[in-house]
Image: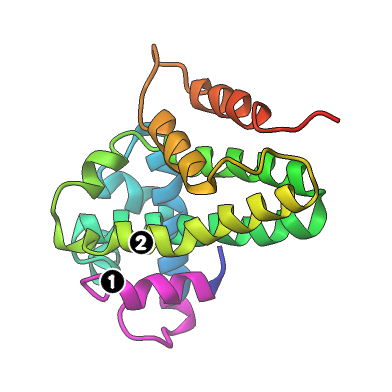
Amino acid sequence: MTNAHLQDQQMKTSADIGGARGLRADAQRSTDALLVAARELFTSTGVDATTREIAERAGVGMGTLFRRFPQRSDLIAAVFYSEMEDCAQAALTLSADHPPFEALAQWMQVYVQFLSTKPGLARALSSGDPAFVGSFARFGERLRPAIQNLFAAAVAAGEVRPEIDAIEILCATTTLCMTPYDGKPDHAGQMVALLVGGLRLHR
């Protein structure tokens, strides 16, 4: 994750979670460490991981955590926004490095990992907490263009069915990611791979 990503989410969350722009180098390192630690714990145990666990993994004190992220929800929002930016950037990287259909298929799996690997995220985002105000609008602003551009390139290359709407695919994938299935962590990825495979035109 880049410093630009971190500065972006710091400006846009409700509590000005990172403080003012231009953090001292040590403060920026603490912020980065907290976001990495939170990201890892949210993936392994869910967004209900305690702030103490996050601070210990990051190697910082509780006071540092609360200076950077006054509310626990601010930290959840920060991780969500930084991963959203990573997901949007991945669309550009994949489209530059792979043929259109392969770029689309790989990006869909990046999207699956973004949404489905953090138990409790959907509940948190829908909680009404002020930290998440505008999160769904921003989600659409960043990720809808990503799939639309990937899909349009695949259509132009004659690799996918042109009658399908890219946003419908994104919505269907989101539903799959938010629906647990017998505790199988890879279920959403497998179902999305089948969905994307069904879009392909075989010549």
Q: Secondary structure at mark 2?
A: helix
Q: Amino acid at mark 2?
A: Ala
Q: Secondary structure at mark 1?
A: loop
Residue 4 appearing in the image: yes
Q: Give the Cα distance between marks 1 and 2.
A: 8 Å
Q: Is residue 65 left or right of residue 89?
A: left
Q: Which mark is residue 17?
A: 1
Local crowd at mark 2 within 10 Å, few (<14), some, or many (≥20)?
many
Residue 24 position, x and y percent, is 44, 85
Residue 34 appearing in the image: no
| Highlighted range, magenta | 4-27
Q: Is residue 202 left or right of residue 171?
A: right
Q: Amino acid at mark 1?
A: Ile
Residue 100 position, x and y percent, is 76, 49
Residue carrying label 2: 78
In magenta stretch: residue 21: yes
Going from N to C along the chain, the mark reached first, 1 or 2, is 1
Most extreme residue toward the right is 203
Local crowd at mark 1 within 10 Å, few (<14), some, or many (≥20)?
many
Q: Is residue 116 left or right of residue 18?
A: right
Quadrant where the N terminus lies?
Answer: bottom right
Q: Are marks 1 and 2 in contact (CB under 8 Å)?
A: yes
Asked if residue 167 is positioned above or below residue 71 in the image, the reply reads above
